[in-house]
């Protein structure tokens, strides 16, 4: 028995469409296919790939990730376009709701056409659902339509919608909207003193009542000043704005405005860094490393998260630095 080439290739291309190393997965399957003594594993892989459950889940994953791809890329950019991010959040929420309400028939037709093209058996939706690899005796009294429509299709969409609501509620969207008022694009066309004053209210520990009054006055002087300065007219992001304020010494003149700008710059970085650390923990703190100390764990996380930088460091330089920390005792003469 061999792996269904066209079927698996198209399914894997659906799942790993954005991964450049797609050929690696195909070569891996070919090695498993020709490796002696692994026929049970081969049969299991073939069965999973040629099941309706896998095809259904792969297409659902592809559609949901496709609808949220632009939002994900926008939020992960170093220089974030906050206005577009807010718009993409609303688009993603609306798309999930539309997919939940009216997308089932079109989605099922798409999956059915794919299955018919590659010879995957499409079960009758009014039949009893039996999980793949399970005995019908232990299956619940549930129709196939109920399982795939209610539990999988609607269940996954509701979970994604809930995550979007939790991460981007009205307060967070207001915060992002206020942050966009700092944007220097088009000669500070998005600037709004009221929005920035509202943004400062989100940081009561950093701005006292007196600071807020001072901030209101500084904002009016700040925008009139930098709009007249030619060096500020070609800026396109908040990072360049902060650098230009420091270069011109205006970070000391408009200290309250600059403090608020620093908080705006720090917030996305801190959020992304925390998510990167938690993702890295699953790779670094394995069962074999479960008893390592906090200091060693921190060092391992730093080297793993910033591995692109460490790959550029020469090993001889690391050894020389390590040896220069302190003098070693000379070997005793025998």
Image: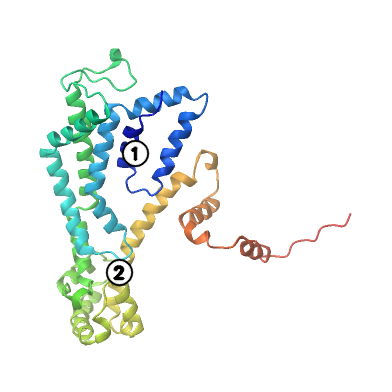
Q: Nearer the viewer, mark 1 or mark 2?
A: 1
Q: Any mark on residue 83, and which?
A: none
Q: Any mark on residue 206, and which?
A: 2
Residue 119 coordinates in the image, percent (x, y): 26, 26
Residue displayed at 26% across by 45% down: 65
- Check disc 1 and report the residue beneath it: 12
Q: In what quadrant of the picture does the N terminus appear? A: top left
Distance of mark 1 from mark 2, alpha carbons? 50 Å
Residue displayed at 28% across by 84% down: 231
- Give 323 or 311, whichever is nearer the viewer: 311
Residue 322 coordinates in the image, percent (x, y): 65, 62
When asked about the image quadrant of residue 207, the answer is: bottom left
* Left or right: 121 in relation to 23: left
Which color scheme is applied?
rainbow
Residue placed furthest toward the left: 102
Residue 255 coordinates in the image, percent (x, y): 30, 79
- Give 238 or 315, whichever is nearer the viewer: 315
Decide if residue 175 is in sight here.
no
Q: Secondary structure at mark 1?
A: helix
Task: Give above or below for 332 relative to 33.
Answer: below
When asked about the image quadrant of residue 317, the answer is: bottom right
- Give 108 or 231, whichever is nearer the viewer: 108
Task: Give above or below for 249 relative to 39.
Answer: below
């Amino acid at each position: 028995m061999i792996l269904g080439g066209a079927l698996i290739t198209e399914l894997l291309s659906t799942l790993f469409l954005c991964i450049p190393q797609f050929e690696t997965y195909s070569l891996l399957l070919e090695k498993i296919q020709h490796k002696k003594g692994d026929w049970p594993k081969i049969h299991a892989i073939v069965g999973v790939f040629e099941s309706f459950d896998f095809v259904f889940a792969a297409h659902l994953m592809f559609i949901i990730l496709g609808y949220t791809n632009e939002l994900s890329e926008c939020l992960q950019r170093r220089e974030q376009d906050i206005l577009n991010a807010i718009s993409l959040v609303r688009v993603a929420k609306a798309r999930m709701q539309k997919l939940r309400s009216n997308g089932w028939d079109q989605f099922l037709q798409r999956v059915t056409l794919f299955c018919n093209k590659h010879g995957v058996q499409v079960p009758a939706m009014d039949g009893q659902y039996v999980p793949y690899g399970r005995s019908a005796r232990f299956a619940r009294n549930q129709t196939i339509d109920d399982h795939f429509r209610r539990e999988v299709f609607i269940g996954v969409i509701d979970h994604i919608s809930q995550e979007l609501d939790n991460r981007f509620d009205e307060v967070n969207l207001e915060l992002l909207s206020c942050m966009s008022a700092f944007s220097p694009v088009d000669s500070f066309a998005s600037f709004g003193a009221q929005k920035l004053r509202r943004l400062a209210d989100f940081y009561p520990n950093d701005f006292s009542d007196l600071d807020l009054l001072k901030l209101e006055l500084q904002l009016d002087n700040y925008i009139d000043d930098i709009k007249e300065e030619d060096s500020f007219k070609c800026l396109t992001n908040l990072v360049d704005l902060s650098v230009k304020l420091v270069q011109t010494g205006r970070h000391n003149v408009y200290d309250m405005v600059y403090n608020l700008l620093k908080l705006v710059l720090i917030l996305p970085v801190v959020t992304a860094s925390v998510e990167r650390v938690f993702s890295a923990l699953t790779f670094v703190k394995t069962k074999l490393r479960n008893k390592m100390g906090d200091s060693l764990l921190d060092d391992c996380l730093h080297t793993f998260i910033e591995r692109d930088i460490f790959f550029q460091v020469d090993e001889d330089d690391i050894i020389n630095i390590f040896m220069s920390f302190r003098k070693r005792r000379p070997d005793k003469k025998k």
